[in-house]
Image: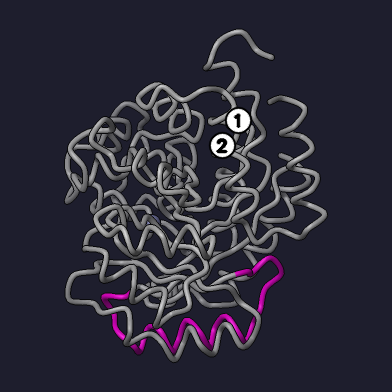
Amino acid sequence: MPENLRAFVAALPKVELHVHLVGSASMRTVTRLARRHPDAGVPADPAVLRRFYTFRDFDHFLTVYWAVQALLRSAADIHELVVGLARDLAAQNCRYAEVTVTPYNHLLDGLPGDDLLAGLASGRAAAAAEHGVELAWCFDIPGEKGPVAGRETLVFALRNRPEGLVSLGLGGPEVGVGRAQFAPFFTAAREAGLHSVPHAGETSGPATVWSAVHDLGAERIGHGTSSAADPRLLAHLAEHRIALEVCPTSNVRTRQVESLAAHPIRRLLDHGVPVTLNTDDPPMFGATLNGEYLAVAETLGLRRAEVAQLARNAVHASFAEDTRKQALLAQLGGVA
Ligand SMILES: [Zn+2]
């Protein structure tokens, strides 16, 4: 077993279940895309880009996010982004990831659906061949754009059904965007064999998580941190093994929690909720998957067996094939 905690975390084979494709763009990837599309006004000079990329506040994060989104204009751009993500995941010893893609936003921005699909497919193949990382897709609905976005996302997902597509998600603001209005799309997706993975309880209270569970049949919850305020909900999540995709650094950056020490993750674990650790929008929040594990382990004073259990939770909560899960668990067993 590696001597120190940092080496132990790095050696753990990991799974990432909550990372947004656009939000995963590293400076290296953005530099290449900015040079390809100079008219977009995104700085291509590394020093200037680093300043642009440094997290200031949530509004600035959104500025960066939409600037990157505007650089994605062809299948080759999507390919570049996907392979860049796979490279970064491999560097974190992450072997399998479910990546959130928001087709509706790309279509609105004028990227043809076929180009998006071609870039995802070729990027996914290269991720496996060049970096040994298996990627799966979650197509998510930008909730603030309403039921029309739900319908379009569902139709796009089911009509094309790309290889690796495992789930339907729901993102964007929670306050004023009730989960229940998206119920018909989640029902149809589940009937078609896709899993239900909405964001809930990140920026609003436990009632949103209940709605995600009851109205959308959520099998995992994006964030779900506000569940900690409702003991009955905690018991429900634990009993039904509904995992939470917890993104600690993201929660601190967006000021949903004051600090990592104030994060309810300990309470979630103490109630037996399956907790997984994830990065959300890693370079934009200055997060890495190893960094999340390390920070949580140090803040909570976790034993190594508990750290390894977090990695196991992610394998169990993933929608990977059974053989893949067994292989990942065996690899984990070799380290921890
Ligand atoms: Zn998210």
Q: Quadrant of residue 164?
A: bottom right
Residues in magenta, as a range: 143-166
Q: Which residue is mark 2?
A: 88
Picture coordinates of residue 256, whole percent (x, y): 21, 48
At mark 1, the secondary structure is helix
**Between residues 88 and 166, which one lies in front from this camera angle?**
166
Ligand 1: which quarter? bottom left
**Between residues 93 and 34, which one lies in front from this camera angle?**
93
- Graded by Cα atoms within 10 Å as few (under 14), some (14 to 19) or many (20 or more), the crowding at tag 2 reads many
Q: Quadrant of residue 86?
A: top right
Tell whether label 1 touches label 2 (CB within 8 Å).
yes
Quarter of the image with the N terminus in it? top right
Q: Residue at x 32, y 31 (%)?
A: 50
Quarter of the image with the C terminus in it? top right
Q: Is residue 163 magenta?
A: yes
Residue labelled 2 has its Cβ within 8 Å of some atom of ligand 1: no
Q: Quadrant of residue 117?
A: bottom right
Q: Residue at x 71, y 34 (%)?
A: 332
Amino acid type, residue under disc 2 in the picture = Asp
Q: Which residue is mark 1?
A: 91
Picture coordinates of residue 301, whole percent (x, y): 41, 22
Q: Is residue 65 left or right of residue 99?
A: left
**Main secondary structure along the magenta-highlighted residues:** helix
Picture coordinates of residue 66, whole percent (x, y): 30, 58
Amino acid type, residue under disc 1 in the picture = Ala
